[in-house]
Image (tube, helix red, strand yellow):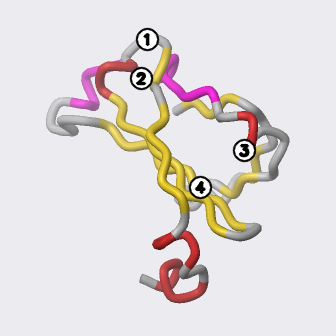
């Protein structure tokens, strides 16, 4: 909720489905929101029950050109990423 409050453009901005690729891609859902100078990319597993038995380390998404070359903050781990393909 804090993210929504601090960056309202990420709630109302342009929505874009992203195509998952790689091993386990059928278990990954991804989308991006862009608004102003802010962008958000979301990667989540489908059917998380039993997901621990799946190896999704090869699954990811190729970012669209408008999102490539940006610096990303992974909210769960705090890692900073600068890459054009995001993987689990």
Task: Give the number of the mark in front: 2 or 3.
Answer: 3
Give the spatial CA distance, label 1 vs label 3: 23 Å
Residue drawn 39% across the image and 19% down it: 25
Q: Are marks 2 and 1 in contact (CB under 8 Å)?
A: yes
Question: Element type at marker 1?
Answer: loop
Give the spatial CA distance, label 2 vs label 3: 23 Å
Give the spatial CA distance, label 2 vs label 4: 17 Å
Name the residue carrying label 3: 67
> Which labelled disc corresponds to residue 42?
none
> Does 33 appear above or below 20?
below
Mark closer to the chain start, 2 or 4: 2
| Residue range corresponding to the magenta coloring | 51-62
Name the residue carrying label 4: 77
Q: Determine which quarter of the picture holds residue 9.
A: bottom right
Name the residue carrying label 2: 56
Mark closer to the chain start, 1 or 3: 1
Q: Determine which quarter of the picture holds residue 44.
A: top left
Give the spatial CA distance, label 4 vs label 3: 21 Å
Q: Residue 20, position in %: x, y?
A: 45, 25
Name the residue carrying label 1: 23
Q: Residue 6, position in %: x, y?
A: 59, 86
């Amino acid at each position: 909720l804090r993210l929504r409050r601090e960056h309202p453009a990420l709630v109302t901005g342009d929505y874009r489905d992203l195509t998952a690729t790689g091993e386990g891609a059928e278990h990954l859902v991804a989308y991006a929101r862009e608004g102003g100078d802010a962008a958000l990319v979301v990667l989540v597993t489908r059917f998380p029950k039993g997901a621990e038995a799946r190896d999704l380390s090869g699954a990811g998404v190729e970012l669209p050109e408008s999102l490539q070359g940006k610096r990303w903050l992974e909210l769960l781990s705090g890692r900073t990423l600068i890459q054009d393909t995001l993987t689990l």
